Image (cartoon, coloured by chain):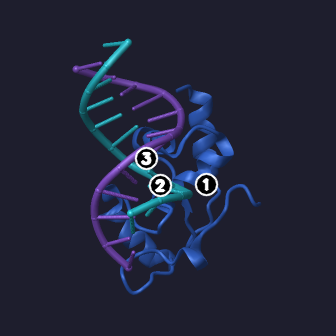
Chain colours: A blue, B cyan, C purple
Amino acid sequence: MDEEYVERVLEIVERIPAGRVTTYGAVAAVVGGGPRQIGTVMAHHGGPVPWWRVIRADGTLPPSHQGEALDRYRDEGTPWDSRGRVRMRDAFWDPGAE
DNA sequence: AGACTGACGGTTA
DNA sequence: ATAACCGCCAGTC
């Protein structure tokens, strides 16, 4: 996994607007590789970027987003549905459809 | 080489 | 709507 790939991933994450989210798969579709890879990249190099705006395709959060991420969503006004999942219908931001 | 693992995702039952 | 399955990509043991 080379640095250039990581850079591209982080670059995209930085472009996610506040209050919106995108998915691992969507990012993978742009930079290449698989969703798992994006996850790995974020786990190791996600610190400096808005990592909480990258979630699963079904709108649920990975275990790692449980703490701080929730506060962030509250601040940014990220739309939630009644069952504690992000309302993808409104919040999804497609990094490939700019 | 083979098995296991992980911030995943789409299909099928 | 839920859960089981299987495919996916790279790293590690």
Q: Residues at badges 3 and 2 in contact (C-beta under 8 Å)?
A: yes
Task: Calculate the distance from the C-alpha at mark 1 to the C-alpha at mark 3.
Answer: 20 Å
In the image shown, does A74 or C10 lie closer to the viewer?
C10
Q: Is residue A4 left or right of residue A55?
A: right
Mark closest to the chain's N terminus, 1 or 3: 1
In the image shown, does A17 or A80 lie closer to the viewer?
A80
Task: Calculate the distance from the C-alpha at mark 3 to the C-alpha at mark 2.
Answer: 7 Å
Mark closest to the chain's N terminus, 1 or 2: 1
Q: Is residue A77 left or right of residue A70?
A: right
**Above or below, comparing residue A76 to residue A30 in the picture:** below
Q: Is residue A30 left or right of residue B12?
A: right
Q: Residue at x 59, y 43 (%)?
A: A9
User: Can you tell which of label 1 and label 2 is closer to the viewer?
Assistant: 1
The disc placed on residue A47 is 3
In the image shown, does A68 or A54 lie closer to the viewer?
A54
Q: Residue at x 32, y 55 (%)?
A: A64
SS state under label 3: loop
* Amino acid type, label 3: Gly
Q: Percent x, y for residue A73?
A: 44, 73
Q: Which residue is mark 2?
A: A51
Task: Calculate the distance from the C-alpha at mark 1 to the C-alpha at mark 2.
Answer: 14 Å
